Amino acid sequence: MTTTLDGSAPPARTYDVGGSDEVAERGRLVVTLGEGTDAVTVGVFRFRGRLYSYENVCAHQGGPACQGRIVSRVRERLDAEKRSLGLAFDDDEMHIVCPWHGFEYDVTTGRHPGRPDYALRAVSVDEEGGRIRVTV
């Protein structure tokens, strides 16, 4: 991110990134906003009817996290004695998987499920009148 002459961040700018119908349930839209050194790429996701948006930079090693697979969280099933019954998909939690090293992020929080200190940078997103807008 660039700074102004006085060292402060430039004012936030709102971008119209597309129509509401461009992000289906459990889907995504990845767009680059701005130009040159001020450009930023963000991913917009829809889960349970709500939009979430993050900068397309993996907190692990800087990969394009928002462009990775979208999967349900994988959980280990345990019996009463805590023995493994195998793995199962949990459709109540959607994850984004960075294509570089498989680092996963919960789409509703932007945080890695096992390492919450690793998180995607959230971007403000709004939906009104059939249009999606993000502010960076």
Image (cartoon, helix red, strand yellow):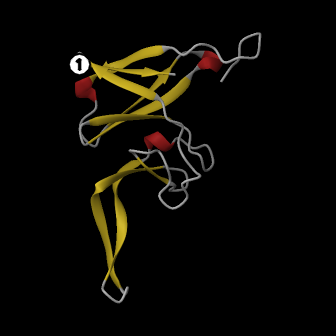
Q: Is residue 71 left or right of residue 42?
A: left
Local packing at callout 1 (Cα closer than 10 Å; few below 14, some 14-19, many 20+) is few
Dividing the picture into quarters, in which one does residue 18 lie? top left
Task: Report the residue at 50% width, 56% height from top.
Answer: 102
Q: Is residue 91 left or right of residue 101?
A: left
Label 1: which secondary element? loop
Total numbered labels placed on residues in the image: 1
Residue furthest out toward the right? 6
Residue furthest out toward the front? 80
Residue furthest out toward the top? 5
Give residue 124's position: percent from left, percent from top: 44, 27
Instruction: Report which residue position mark 1 lands on.
Output: 130
Q: Amino acid at mark 1?
A: Gly
Give residue 29's position: percent from left, percent from top: 36, 31
Give residue 45's position: percent from left, percent from top: 35, 37
Dividing the picture into quarters, in which one does residue 63 lie? top right
31 in relation to 99, above or below: above
Q: Is residue 90 left or right of residue 98?
A: left
Q: Is residue 4 left or right of residue 104?
A: right
82 in relation to 113, above or below: below
Task: Report the residue at 37% width, 85% height from top.
Answer: 82
The quadrant of the image that shows the N terminus is top right
Of 59 and 32, nearer the camera is 59
Give residue 26's position: percent from left, percent from top: 28, 43
Of 2 and 9, nearer the camera is 9
Task: Report the residue at 27% width, 27% height from top.
Answer: 22
38 in relation to 65, above or below: above
Dividing the picture into quarters, in which one does residue 109 lie? top left
Task: Report the residue at 39% width, 49% height from top.
Answer: 69
Of 4 and 42, nearer the camera is 4
